[in-house]
Amino acid sequence: YDDTFRLWAYWHWWHSGPENRPQVKKQTLKRSSPDSHPGADPADPPLAFVFSHDVARFLVHLITQVPDLPAANQSHFDAVNLGCDLQIPMRNFLELLAQASGLHGVSPACVERPKGFLPSVDRPLPLDFKKLKETYLFSATPLEEVLKVCADWFSDACKHFPEEAAEAAMKLPPSARAPALAYAGLEMPQSPSSDSSSS
């Protein structure tokens, strides 16, 4: 996870009860423009997800394997996209996270003005990983596997890193915070004013 706790917050949100489902923007009925990606919904663009383990693996791959790849040594400087092959709208991404967390048959709530933490970059088209695979001969971890690793880590980390876990839960809408904290066995963090008044 990253230190913004965004994905962890979504994990908490799924566990805060059916009345507090994660939110996505209600899909529009507008026709796509001729230049848009087939099947793309401008209200719910495809999400590109990068797994930190893949970044580490790719760095090791560059050191140990790339020197032997002629196509990857034509330039001293290069740029390459790195991320999971599967790039899907936020709604489907959250459904995969729910499944990885042991919740099946659930879907996010579709609202006009959703509260959300991802994506961090608005990108209307999927990223192209052709160069990553053909030039550098590297394949990223499948998204389903990534989310299962993350969901298992989030569950375990609630016991080992309760302060960070609670901080992630506090990113949720107010109505979802208490049930999310209760599910994870966490206490409501004290506000700075409470700390100062009790000292």
Image: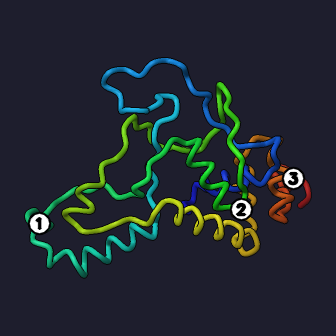
For image coordinates 71% across by 73% down, the residue present is 156
- In what element is the residue under mark 2? loop
Whichever of labels 3 and 2 marks the residue nearer the N terminus, that label is: 2
Q: Is residue 4 left or right of residue 39?
A: right
Confirm or deny contact between disc 3 and disc 2 (CB under 8 A).
no
The label nearer to you, 2 versus 1, is 2
For image coordinates 68% across by 61% down, the residue present is 101
Res 194 label: 3
Question: Which residue is label 2 attached to?
Answer: 102
Per the model, the C-alpha gap separating discs 2 and 1 is: 43 Å
Image quadrant occupied by the N terminus: bottom right
The residue at the far top in this view is: 30
The residue at the far bottom in this view is: 64
Per the model, the C-alpha gap separating discs 3 and 2 is: 36 Å
Image quadrant occupied by the C terminus: bottom right
User: Quick check: 62 above or below 12?
Assistant: below
The label nearer to you, 3 versus 2, is 2
User: Quick check: 40 above or below 142?
Assistant: above
Residue 175 x, y percent position in the rendering:
83, 41
For image coordinates 39% across by 57% down, the residue present is 83
- In what element is the residue under mark 3? helix
Amino acid at dot 2: Gly
Q: Is residue 186 left or right of residue 67?
A: right
Q: Is residue 100 left or right of residue 172?
A: left
Tell me the colour scheme of the image: rainbow
The label nearer to you, 3 versus 1, is 1
Res 71 label: 1
For image coordinates 71% across by 47% down, the residue present is 106
- In what element is the residue under mark 1? helix
Residue 82 x, y percent position in the rendering:
34, 58
